[in-house]
Structures are given as structure tokens and as C-alpha cells.
Image (tube, rainbow, N blue to C red):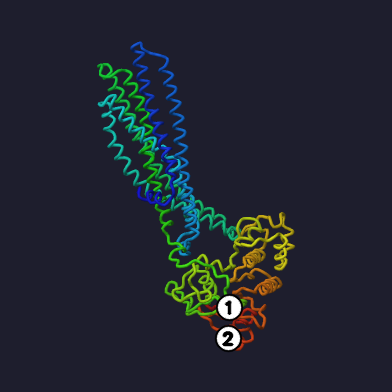
Amino acid sequence: MIDNIRNILKIVKIDKVMLSIGILFSLLSTIASLSFPILLKNIINDITKNNFTPMSIFMLILIALLDLLFTGISMYLLARVGELVVLNLREKLWKKILNAKFGFFEKNSNGEIISRLMNDTNLLNEIFSTEVAEFITGIFTVIGTIFILIKLDALLTLLIAVNIPFITIIIYPLGKFLFKNSKEVQKANANTSNYILDKLNNIRLIKTSSTLTSEIIGGNNQFKKIYNFDMKRNMVQSIITPIIMLIFVSTIIGMIFFGAYRVIKGIITPGNLFAFIVYIIQLMPSLITIVTFWNKISVASGASSRIYDILNFEDEGKNIINFHTNKNISSLILKNIVFSKNGEKIIDDFSFNFKINNFYNIVGFSGAGKSTIFNIICKFIIPTSGSLSINNDSNYSTYDWRNNIAYISQSINMFEDTLRMNILYGVKEKYTDDEILNYLSKIGLKNIVNKLPKGLDTKISRDSSILSGGEKQRIALLRGVLSKKTILLIDEVSSNVDSKNDYMIYSFLKENNSGRIILNITHKLSNFQNDDNIVVIDKGKIESYGTENQLMVTSPIYKKLKKFYNGKVNKGYLNKKGN
């Protein structure tokens, strides 16, 4: 179990200087703490012999103050070391998640990823920031106390030592149980987080479907699973903890009676017995701290293994031969692209040379493979075979390849931030408010933005009702255009707008075609002009390519599409295979 945490510590940075200073002060604190009972013993013995001096009290107070000071410094420094470890871990984890291949996001739900990043690291945070500091102090205290106890009375010390095997027998199976229970709890937490995210993302559907009662029951069932796992752990701990305490209390009672007997016999002094009792009282919390630490290590080990799995996940930055960005793009070439999934060929020998200063309308029935082609171009998915290149050069890092591409997807991509931030997200150039408003006027949004409470500084999100779905899609389109990236991929960006705004968007894109390669997936064929480039895709292949006039003669699929989207197709077309 400890190997999982050791693997994490090999990856993160540890401030060894601060750790060493923290351990030093912890040692000084332990020495001061262990000196306290010795001073008490001497005072008691001096009183019985009438040799008491006020200096003894002064030394006792001084040692107590030094103990408090050293403990405070040690706890702070060691806690800071732990917090920095967790901060570094979260930074590495976040970077790894963002750089992960898209297969990672298919295998792990958003709820699971959030749980790894927050809940699992919180478990480690508790260990590294608090428990480690207390554990180190506890170890020093136990070692020092045992050494002094042997010096005071070896026989009484032996009486305490015989209980250690019993405690070990209890702790070992408890640790194994907590390790297993931790995995169950964290999985239940991740599933619940994912469940909640899913429901919140679809809150409008839930409210309009009158399914509130069933969703409340579903959420409660998720919470009960966590409750049951937690109660299983609490039940075991509620049984084990009293047993351990019973062993400790029995030991102290036995020690008092046996120690009193040895004082009566004159084997040890009253001061020695008093110091022995104080040391045992000091020893008990330290032993409990060590026991608790190893139990929590068992819990944190499960979290560490899940975090380590993510850190070992292959990212998009490996196996890169060269890093560069081509600023003089003349063509995007897809050659013999094949993509299969679950034994089914989605894209079949797709080849095309998309050239600069050209606007390509990508059309086809649902399921033809249009969006899949965009995913391949963006390198969200890797083709089974074939090649992609820019200017016949495929020697790009994934990052630099995408640095040439702006992708506006069907789904509305909005961050919970200001309208300005959402417009300029990922945009390298600086734009004044007047320039932004000028662009907004070209897509019919200037007057709408001027009516917002704070204009460009109005907070919006994907689900906010301040802007309509069509308006948000136009914001996403403007973001792509302002990025000034050479390759612009547009996937049904006008699906939520009326005919007037649809034509405005189409004209805006044509105006910004210079120096770009624009690929526009659309089902709205009415905007096409006679000289527009149209690529017709069917069953993962290019069925035909040309202008509308040419395709109405040469492409059976395009003629069907034209009839279908003009409402002149019979219901049989609706049964054509979907995407």
C-alpha cells in the first residue's frame, strides 16, 4: 500500500530544506517534552528530601515554553511542506488531464476526473499537511519515551511492551479493510459527482419532463451508497478503537498498581513512578497518532493509486519528433484516411486537398462521417490508417498542429465568465471594445450586447438565459474568426439561428475567407452560391465535389439532400442511417 504513496512522492517536488528544518524543530520539541517529566521527578524527589529550590520551577516553565515554541514551528514548517507537495501534485495532475488523449475522457467520466483532482488529493492533503507532521513528532516521542522508561524502570517498561503485539494484530487487518473501503468510497463519490453533473447539465429537460420525483430518488440512492460505505468503516472503527483504548487503560492501571508496589518495596522512588506515569500519558497520544496515521495511510493509498494511474496515462505530447508552427499554410491534405470503431468502418479511404483562400461546404446525410472527419483533423481521434499533413508536412506536434486550427463545434462552448472573455478566449491579438463591437455588428449582436446589464463585462455561461442558443453560437463563431488561425472548422454553427441570421453568418464567413481554409459542415443548402465549393460525403467517402450547378448534374446524393432539406423528400429518406 505504501508503494502507491511512494510513487507519488517520486513525481512531486519536496522542499527538502524546509522538511529538514521542520524535522529538526520536531526533534527539539520532543527533547523539551521529554525533559518535562524528568524535571517533575527531580522536583518531587527534592521535596521528599527537603532539597527543593525555586530554580526548578523556573526551569520547568522554561522547558514548557520552549516545547510550545518548537512544536508550533515544527508543525507549521512540516504542514507547509505537505501543502506544497499537494499543490505541486494538483498542478501536475491538472496539466496531465488537459494533455491527456481523448481516449482518457472516453474512459473516465467528468465526475470521476473531478473526484481524482479534488477528493483524492484532499485525502493526500490531510496526510501530507497534518498527519505527517504529527507522525514525525510521535515517532520521536515514542523512541525517546521508551528509552527513558527503560532507564527509569525496565520491568515496568516490559509490562507495557507486551501489549504491542496485540495492538499490531488489530491494526494490520484494519489497514487492509480501510484500503479496500477507501476505494469503494471514492468510486461512489466519483459516481455521485458524475450523476449530479449530468443532471445539472440537463436541468431544463428534467423540469419539463416532470421527472423531479424520480431524479430526487435517484440522487438519494447515490447518497445512500456513500452513506453505507462510510457507515461500514465507522462500524469497524467503533469496534476497534474501544478495544485499543481498553488495552491502553488496562496497561496504565496495571502499571500504577505494580509501580506502587515497587515504591513500597523501595525499588523505585515516588518521583520515578510519577515521571513514569507522565511519560505513559505522553506516550499514549503519540501511539494513537502513529496507529491513526497508518490507518489513514491505508485510506490515502487507494487515492494515490488512482492519481498515479492518471499521471501514467499517455498524453498527447509523447513521441514528438519536431515542434513548429507553419505560418505559410497553403494546403491541408488528408490522404487515404480510414477510421474504424468496434469493427465498423466509419471513414473509408478519404482523400482531399483543402487549399488556402477556399471555402468548402461539407454536406451529407446524418451518419455520413462529416463530424468524424473534423475530429480526425483536430486529432481528437487517430485514424486507423492514412495521413494528415499541412503543405505535405506531417511532422507536427499535436499542440502545434492544433495551433493552426480553430474549431467551432455543434455544442455551445461557453465558460462561466464575462462575454468579453468568451469572445477573446484563445485569441492572441488585442482588440479594443470598439473593434469587438464592430465585429459583433457584423453577426447581428451589437444591439443585443449593448442592452446587457454590463455590456461586454456581463457574466454568461453555457446554460445562462441571457443569450439565446443562436446568439451563443455566433459568439463561438466570432471567437474562431478572431483567433486568426488559418484552418477554420465549423460544425453546424447556424443550426439554432433563423434564415436571416443564417445568411448573415454565411456572408461573414465568406468575407473572412482570405488567408484561410474554411470547412463548413451544414445542412442548410439555401445559402450556397453558384461558385461555392461543395464536398459531398456519403458512407465515410467523398461521393462528389464541385459547385452546386455541377453537383445537381453529377451527384445523386446531393440531389437527394437538396430535395430532403427543401422538404420535397418522402419519408423513406428519414430512415437513412444516422451519424
- Against 61, residue 520 (above or below) is below
Residue 289, horizontal then vertical, whole percent: 39, 36
Residues under labels 2 and 1: Cα distance?
22 Å
Tag 2: residue type?
A: Ser
Q: Considering depth in this image, is 474 or 47 the residue closer to the camera?
A: 47
Q: Secondary structure at mark 1?
A: strand
Q: Is residue 499 above or below residue 568?
A: above
Q: Is residue 261 visible?
A: no
Residue positioned most to the bottom: 553
Taking the image as shown, residue 359 lies to the left or right of residue 386, namely: right
Which dot marks residue 555?
2
**577 or 532, which lies in front?**
532
Q: Is residue 363 above or below residue 172?
A: below
- Of residues 218 and 28, the one nearer the viewer is 28
Q: Amino acid at mark 1?
A: Lys
Estimate the x, y position of residue 56 in percent, counting from the top left: 40, 18
Is residue 515 found left or right of 332 in the rendered image?
Answer: right
Residue under the image location 63 percent in, 60 percent down? 422
Q: Residues within 10 Å of mark 1 (few under 14, many from 20)?
A: many
Q: Which residue is drawn at the image coordinates 57% and 73% (left, top)? A: 329
Residue 3 visible in rendering: yes
- For label 1, the residue is 355
